Amino acid sequence: MKQIAIVLALCVGAWYFFVGGRKLDEPMVRDYYRSEARAVVERDADRLCKQLSRKVVIETRTTVMGRTEENTHDRDSACRGVHKTFENLALVGERTGNILSVDYDYHIDSVEVAPDRKSALVKGTSVLKMGESALQLKTSFNQRLERELGQMRLVHAEDSTVVRLGGRGAMSQSDFFRK
C-alpha cells in the first residue's frame, strides 16, 4: 500500500511538473502585472527579480534628453538595474525631504495566450512617476511570459523607455495612454 501511495505521489508530481504547472491563462497574466505593480509601488526589488525567469532576455531602449541607449540584460543585470533604480529613487526622495511620491500605473493593450497555453505575449505601457512631473519613466513593452513550476515568469522583453525630467517636456499620464 505504501508503494502505491509513493508511485501515485510521483505520478501527480510528474504531471504537475510537465503539464499542470506550465499552463497559463489571461487572468494569470493579469495577476502577474498586478503583482509587479504592487512590487514597484512598495519598491520591492527582490520580488520583481523573483518574477524573472533564469533564462530571461530583456532588450531595452532608453531615451534620456534626446539620447538613446540600447542594452540587453540577463536576470542578474536586470536585478542589479532594478535595485539601482530603487536606490536612486530613495536618494532623490531623501534629497527632496521625501515630499515627492512615487506613482506607478500600467495598461495592458493585448494578451495573446499561445494555443498550448504555455506562454503569453503581452503588449502594453507603464508609467513610473516621482512627483507630478519631476521624473517620469514611460515604457512601451512587448513581453513573453511563461509558467515555470507553477510561477509566472518573464522570459523575454522588448522595452522602450522615455525618461523625462520635470518642466514643460513632461507629459501627463492621460496624454501618454491616449491613442
Image (cartoon, rainbow, N blue to C red):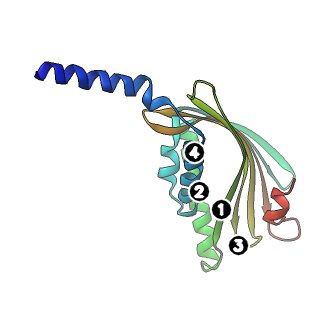
Q: Earlier in the sequence, mark 4 or mark 1?
A: 4
Report how far apart the C-alphas of labels 3 and 1 lie in the structure.
Answer: 11 Å
Mark 2–mark 1 distance (CA, rounded to whole Å): 7 Å
Quick one: 44 or 126, which is closer to the camera?
A: 126
Image x and y of residue 46, in percent: 47, 51
The amino acid pointed to by label 2 is Ala
Which percent across, then down, holds residue 11?
30, 21
Residue at image position (58%, 51%) is 82
Q: Residue 28 location in percent, x, y? A: 54, 43
Q: Amino acid at mark 3?
A: Gly
- Which is more N-terminal, label 3 or label 4? 4
Q: Give how far apart the Cα atoms at labels 4 and 2 are.
A: 15 Å
* Residue wearing tag 4: 27
**Mark 4 to mark 3 CA distance (whole Å):** 31 Å
Q: Which residue is identified by label 2?
A: 37
Three-letter amino acid code at disc 1? Tyr
* Residue drawn at 53 percent across, 38 percent down: 153
The numbered mark at residue 131 is 3
Q: Which of the labelled discs sits on residue 104, or is there none?
A: 1
Q: At 55% across and 59% down in the image, what residue appears?
A: 38
Q: Looking at the picture, how far across and down is residue 137, in whole percent?
A: 73, 57
State yes or no: discs 3 and 1 in contact (Cβ < 8 Å): no
Give the CA separation, mark 2 to mark 3. 17 Å
